[in-house]
Image (cartoon, grey):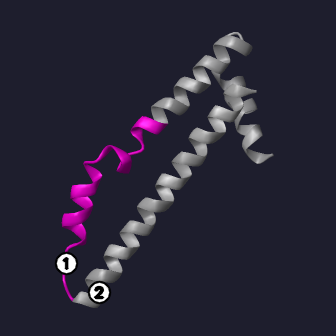
Amino acid sequence: KRYIEHYLEICELQNFAELNKTGFYKILKKFDKLAGQSVKHIRIRTFEERAFFRSTVLEEQRLTCEREFARLFWQRDVEKAREELQSSLQE
């Protein structure tokens, strides 16, 4: 149960990070349009260097959780473990 909850939290955090990233892009686009400037590409490059803006860390944690869940409960069958974990996302 804790693995499933942890997996759900990682997925929610990934979704939240992606939503924030999309919102940030839209804010910069609107600023450029209203201000008649072109700072979007500069700011995006700056923020993409930050860990919180990249999803690689969360993706690695999600994959690690899937592998551990498979090792503990599915005789290392990651596909079946992933199916069970992802089915909990729909509930």
Look at the picture and state if 53 lies above or below 20.
Answer: above
**What residue sits 40% from the left and 38% below the top?**
56
The label on residue 82 is none
Asked which secondary structure carries label 2, the reply is helix
Q: Is residue 55 magenta?
A: yes
**What residue sits 48% from the left and 55% below the top?**
18
**What residue sits 53% from the left and 28% below the top?**
63
Q: Is residue 45 magenta?
A: yes
List x then y, in percent, for residue 33: 29, 86
The label on residue 38 is 1
**What residue sits 22% from the left and 67% below the top?**
41
> Splitting the image into 4 quarters, where does residue 32 fall?
bottom left
Quarter occupied by the N terminus: top right
> Splitting the image into 4 quarters, where does residue 36 fall?
bottom left
* Number of other residues with Cα within 10 Å of mark 2, as a class: few under 14, some 14 to 19, many 20 or more: few
List x then y, in percent, for residue 67: 59, 20
Q: Earlier in the sequence, mark 2 or mark 1?
A: 2
Residue segment shown in magenta:
36-58
The label on residue 33 is 2
Q: Predominant secondary structure in magenta?
A: helix
* Number of other residues with Cα within 10 Å of mark 1, as a class: few under 14, some 14 to 19, many 20 or more: few
Task: Tell me the amino acid under the disc marked 1.
Answer: Ser
